[in-house]
Image (tube, rainbow, N blue to C red):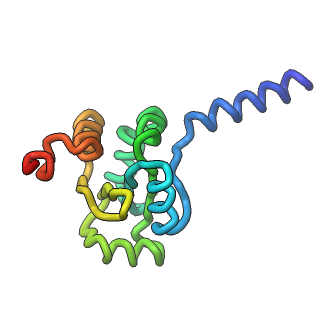
Amino acid sequence: MKKIFVFAIISLFVFSLFGQEFSEGSLDSIIQKAKSENKVVMMKFYSDTCSWCKKLDKEVLVAENLNKLSRLVVLYKINVRTDEGKILREKYNIRGVPTVILLSEEGNEIDRIVGYEKRDDFMKELLSYIFNIGTLSDLIS
């Protein structure tokens, strides 16, 4: 019995390390968290009925990638069908899902990825936005 208990505790710990680390709370609290951790916010707009959103989760936003991303960004997902989701959908002019928006520590939009992209393309584009490489502001400066 003791071995089963120890195994269960270890399993919970290991699985918690690989869980999807999306933060919860209001957008204001998420922005404050990002500011205090010196990170950007990655908002993922989705719908439960969206097949491309599910494909993005299953093939791109897998635990391994989320764990790497969580070192750079505060992850926040918004269901566009909830009350808060409807408000944020209008505020950020979301016309389709999935849409991923990066916000600076101040809450300003850095850029967005609209629709599904394969894992390597998605991660490359996302990291270029986070590190401001090849973006419009990078080219201007």
Q: For residue 130, which quarter of the picture?
A: top left
Looking at the image, residue 67 sits to the left or right of residue 53; the answer is right
Q: Position of residue 34 (x, y in %)?
A: 45, 54
Which residue corresponds to the image point at 38% horizontal and 73% vertical from the top-left?
88
Looking at the image, residue 138 sits to the left or right of residue 101; the answer is left
Specify whether residue 122 is in view.
no
Q: Is residue 39 above or below residue 28?
A: above
Q: Position of residue 90 (x, y in %)?
A: 31, 77
Observer-nearest of 33 and 68: 33
Which residue corresponds to the image point at 10% horizontal and 48% vertical from the top-left?
141
Q: Residue reaching furthest top?
A: 3
Observer-nearest of 33 and 63: 33
Which residue corresponds to the image point at 35% horizontal and 46% vertical from the top-left?
56
Q: Residue reaching furthest front?
A: 141
Observer-nearest of 41 and 89: 41
Which residue corresponds to the image point at 52% horizontal and 44% vertical from the top-left?
20
Specify whether residue 104 is in view.
yes
Q: Position of residue 62 (x, y in %)?
A: 44, 38
Quarter of the image with the N terminus is top right
Q: Residue reaching furthest right?
A: 1
Q: Position of residue 117 (x, y in %)?
A: 24, 44
Image label count: 0
Q: Is residue 43 above or below residue 69?
A: below
